[in-house]
Every structure is written in structure tokens, then in C-alpha cells.
Image (cartoon, rainbow, N blue to C red):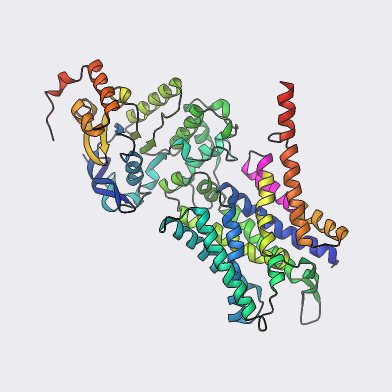
Amino acid sequence: MTPALEIHDLTVAFDRKPVLWNIDLMIPEGKLVGIIGPNGAGKSTLIKAMMGILPLSSGYVKIFDKPLDDIRDRISYVPQRESVDWDFPASVLDVVLMGRYSKLGLFKRPRKADRDAALECIKKVGMEGFINRQISQLSGGQQQRTFLARALAQQADMYFMDEPFAGVDAATEKAIVTLLRNMTAQNKTVIVVHHDLQSVSQYFDWVIMLNTRLVAAGPTATTFTSKNLETTYGGKLTLLTDVADLMRRENYPSREENIIQP
Amino acid sequence: MNNDLSIILTASLVSASCALLGCFLILRKMAMVGDAISHAVLPGIVIAFLVSGSRDSVTMLLGAGIIGMFTTFLIEFFHKKARLQTDASIGVTFTWLFAIGVVLISLFAGKVDLDQDCVLYGEIAYVPLDVIITQGGINLGPKALYVSGIILIVNLLFIFLAYRKLFLTTFDPAFASAIGISTALWHYAIMGAVSMTTVASFESVGAILVVALLIAPAATAYLITDNFKMMLALACLFGVLSSIGGYYLAVWLDGSIAGAIATISGLLFGLVMILSPTHGLFFKKIKAVAH
């Protein structure tokens, strides 16, 4: 089986200082993938590099065994919520319709089919009561749902999401996770930058642990171990105690003996 | 054609073009890039003039267009490569280019039929004097009217055809690049349009006041509406209102028309700022008291 995404020898540098160093990994199709690591580990940079919106210093990325530019219409992106200006004069529908733009030609206008698709995605994220609401008048969770609906409207096969759970309420988080589960059930690959270590084993099938270099990548059950967590978050004492707590609560160490180190 | 009417019409066409592009500049947080371009195109105009030896509008537009793009490029370059803050790189770029333009004008003052005052402040009152006359001797009306009309049509076509790409790259450039829409291409396209429009507005309102037309009507529209298409329409409306109001203010005061137009656009902004039903200070106060 060809992997959904394959990265070889990827290095990204800003101003000659490497932010990502020599990353090699592959992700199988239809998985819900979490990217975790401390602040400044290069998590957002990694997904931006995967989508080819940052220049690579070395290496390559292949999605569905093809170079990026051939499969652009099969990938979608949910940026960090703070990355845009929410005071922009646009409604929820305007934003979700943007998800249809890649399906339209250069100068074509959206047709009724596009509108219907957008409306259906708005319904999927439970925002049907806010279709014409200006986006600055939404709560953080609603803004995140709007972004998600836009990505859904694209009907892509691979989704990249940058911290979709940041600043959203518990109900929205749960709704989003259910939605992501449904997507992976339809064999879509979803790659999520994630912050909260507590929920990793509950949410993700596959995990990428990152700290400038790749620490580990693989199925959550065998990869999300205390040893890997220590390597990923090493040196950050407060985090280490958090991790230790987590380990104790979840009884992780008992599994550790069965791990085959790569 | 009546003199008053041709001046008002020219000013209105120019301010509508500026207002449309201004909406994009504001939302891209690049209002000052508009300022920079409007000043920096000066050497472009002078050089085009010296090379071609004529005040032919097409040559001027080309010269200015090239320098306008060059300005945008320089600003990006200083910001990205020299790691200068955006505002600092704008400041360095446009003052430098503008200064070159001023030096060029003063150097070639004898050969160039360009007046510094006219370039800086514009002289829209002369619009009716520069008319197009056919070989048969028929007066077709002021040249500036045709130039600004064509520029407005070009801008309208540009925005109408590329509306979605412009909207998306303005709102969320990261998403746009992820789905394969070139943000750099549309960035330079807008800057090209701003350069062209600025030059076309030069003769009427000058290098300094064109900034008022780029920013003030769009900023005013931004205060009242939450809908982008509405914002474009309202910005044009405010531009046209400023032109008409400004003309009559100037006649009444017997002062500079361009100055009066910019003054009115500022006044309109102030009025809307206070009285806007949704965001206005006045209604917010009333609501606060009512609660």
C-alpha cells in the first residue's frame, strides 16, 4: 500500500537557523494523526512544509505518491484561528464558500451546487443558525467550526489542521472530534497539530512526536510512551511532572516493555 | 462640455477607482503601501517623460506601473531579506524614490513640462483646458476625463473578474496558498493596479492627496458595513460625494479643489465615525445609557 503522505530528509530553516531538521516519516491513509511537541518544536512549520507553503531547505514531500502541485485540489487546510483578521467584512457563508474556490476555474462564479455544498457543510458543523452572521460576531468555538466547514466544503482527501481545539469550548471540541472520526471512517487522512497531552491517546490513531527533530512517529498505542515523551519534552521540568502524572494515571509503563525501538 | 461638470466628473471617476482599490489596501493592512506607491511613482513618470519626450498617458502609465511594482518589491525585499520592520522599509523605500523624482524634475526643469507643485498637489482646475480635438476640429472633451474613465473601467473589470481570488488572498493568504492560489501573484496584481490608478490620479489630485482618496472613502465604508461587496459600493459612493462636495467647497472658498476634496473625505469619515448606526460612537453611547 502506498502511504498517504511521505516525507524524506525534510529540513526547513528560517534565516539559516533550522526549525525542522532531517525529518523522515510516512503516514498511512485514513488515520487521525496528532502532531505533538513543546512550543517552538516546529509543529506548525511541519504542516506548512507538508503543504508546500514554506520553502524547504532540503528533502521532499509526496502526498498520495505524487508531488504537491499535482494534488493541490485533494488537500485542505484549517489554519490557526488567530492567523486571520476576524473583523473582516465577511459572513459565515462567504468564508465557507472559499472552500469551493479551488474547484472553480479562474474566473468562474460559484454555482448553486457550490452553494448547496457549502450550506451542507455548515449544517455538519452545527452552524446553520449563523449562515449570514458576520464572522466577528461569532464565539471562538463558532469561528473554529466555520473554518472546519470551509475545509469540509473542499471535499479533499487530506486535511491539515493547526490547533483546531485551541480556545474552543468542551462541546465544540467533542463535536469536532466526532466529525474528524467520521472523516477518517471515510478513509480521509486528517493531520492535527495538538497541544493537550491528556487527550492524545483518546483522540488519535497515529502520533508524530516532534522537537525540531523527529522523536517518534507511529501508532499511538506503541509510540506515545513515557520514554518518547521525555525525549520530546526533555528539559522542561514542569511539563515532565505533568507527563509523569499522566503516565501514572493511565498506567502507561506496563506497556513499555513490549515496545520495539526503531 | 461644461467646465464644472468635467472637473466633477473627472474627480469622481478618479476617486471611485481609488476607493475600490483602497478597500483591498485597508483590509490587507497595507494602507501605507498605497501611500508609498503614490509617491514612489514620481521618478517613473519623469523617466518615462524624458525617454519618450511626451506626456502621452500610456507611456507615463507604463513607467509608473513599473516603478510601482519595483517599490512593492523593494519593500518586501527590505522586510524579508534585511529583516527591517514593514513600516521602516516602507519609509526608506518611498522617500528615497520620491526624492529621486524631485531631483530629476528640478534637474530637467527646462526640458520637462512637469511642474513640482502640479505633481505634489495636482491641478484639477486645468482639466477642462487639456482637450482632445479630432483632425476635423471637433472637440471631444477633456483628456483627463477619458483617462480616468478608462482606468475606472479597467479597475472594475479587474475586481469583477478576479473578485474571489482577491477576496480569499486578502482574508486568508495561508489557506489560499494551501489550495494552490498564488498570493504573490495577486499581491503584485493589486499593487500594479494601485500604481496605474495613482498615476492616472496624479494630474487631478497630485501625489499627496491621492492617498486621501485611496484610504478615506474605504475606511469610511468599513465603518458602516459588514459586507465586503457593500463596502466596495459604499467606498465609491463616499469617493464621489467627496468629489462633488469638495468641488463646491473649493468654489465657495475660492481655494484648492484637490485640498477641498480631501477635506470633505476626512469630514465624511468623522461624521460616519460618530453617527454610524452599527459602529458609531453616538449610538454606542445611547445604547450604553439605555442599558
Residue B258 located within the stretch drawn in magenta: no
**Residue at coordinates 38% horizontally, 25% vertically from top-left?**
A177
| Above/below status of B94 relative to B217 | below
**Residue at coordinates 48% horizontally, 57% vertically from top-left?**
B185
**Residue at coordinates 58% horizontally, 47% vertically from top-left?**
B27
Instruction: Please indicate whether residue A112 sits to the left or right of residue B133 in the image.
Output: left
How many numbered marks does the figure carry? Answer: 0
Whether residue A205 can be seen here: no
- Tell me which segment is drawn in magenta: B222-240
Tell me where residue B35 sits by quadrant.
bottom right
What x and y, as percent, mark residue A218?
A: 21, 33
Q: B12 or B30, which is in the foreground?
A: B30
Instruction: Please indicate whether residue B51 sits to the left or right of residue A188 in the image.
Output: right
Whether residue A193 can be seen here: yes
Residue at the farthest bottom position: B111
What x and y, as percent, mark residue A11?
A: 27, 49
| Above/below status of B184 relative to A144 | below
| Above/below status of A236 relative to B72 | above
What x and y, as percent, mark residue B66?
A: 54, 68
Q: Main secondary structure of the magenta part?
A: helix
Quarter of the image with the C terminus of chain A is: top left
Quarter of the image with the N terminus of chain A is: top left
What x and y, as percent, mark residue A125?
A: 47, 27
Residue B231 located within the stretch drawn in magenta: yes
| Above/below status of A253 relative to B73 | above
Q: A164 or A159, which is in the foreground?
A: A164
Instruction: Please indicate whether residue A186 sits to the left or right of residue B90 in the image.
Output: left
**Residue at coordinates 59% horizontally, 50% vertically from top-left?**
B24
